[in-house]
Image (cartoon, helix red, strand yellow):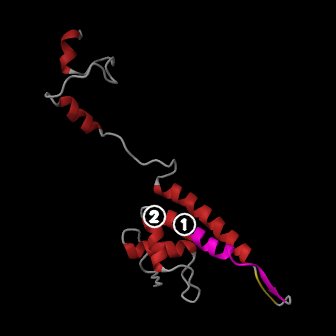
Amino acid sequence: MAWSYDASDLVDTTDAGRLNVVRLLIGDTDTTDQQLQDEEINFALDQVGDNVYFAASWAANAIASKYSRRVTTKLDGALSAEYSDLAKQYRSLSYQLSQDGKKYSGDALGVGWGGLRSTEIDTVRDDTTRVTPSFRMDRFRYPKEDEYLSDYIDE
């Protein structure tokens, strides 16, 4: 298992850069307090299609799950470890990163971009080997711009 972080490589165009960005987003940049291994973050990136915000949300949930397993301990009032609070903080971070992923990646509605370009539509309409459709969206638009109907329109 490996752990790495390079603050000078924070880009989302390379595998190493995405790993570093996810570490930055979840606060796992301290070599003395490592939370997740590189392989775990790379798995998260694979699960969400390399979206760094969603991968960071996934990673924060994984860390929260790790701390959820631990119990809160107190030793004679001198030392205590509040793991439940830590788990709650990571769950909150996970939610915020998920919201950021929707905000910054264009997936706010959970749908991707799509559709046809107007040049593709024009290419299909100009193809003389295709059968002329019996109807289309702009059939009753006036004034008509189609050549094949120009005989019927008085100008």
Residue drawn at x 25%, y 38% is: 120
Instruction: Give the Cα separation between the discs numbered 1 and 2.
Output: 9 Å
Residue type at numbered disc 1: Trp
- Label 1: how many residues lie within 10 Å, few (<14), some (14-19) or many (20+)? many
Which element is circle 1 on?
A: helix
Q: Is residue 61 magenta?
A: yes
- Label 2: how many residues lie within 10 Å, few (<14), some (14-19) or many (20+)? few
Residue to which mark 1 is pinned: 58
Name the quadrant of the C terminus.
top left
Q: Is residue 61 above or below residue 8?
A: above
Pick the front one: 81 or 113 = 81
Q: Are marks 1 and 2 in contact (CB under 8 Å)?
A: yes
Pick the front one: 98 or 68 = 68
**How many discs appear?**
2
Q: Residue furthest right?
A: 76
Residue drawn at x 33%, y 19% is: 141
Residue drawn at x 53%, y 79% is: 36
Res 82 → quadrant: bottom right
Q: Is residue 108 magenta?
A: no
Q: Position of residue 91 (x, y in %)?
A: 65, 66
Residue to which mark 2 is pinned: 47
Is 125 on the left or on the right of 93, as rendered? left
Q: Is residue 74 above or below residue 146?
A: below
The stretch in magenta equals: 60-75
Residue type at numbered disc 2: Gln
Res 35 → quadrant: bottom right
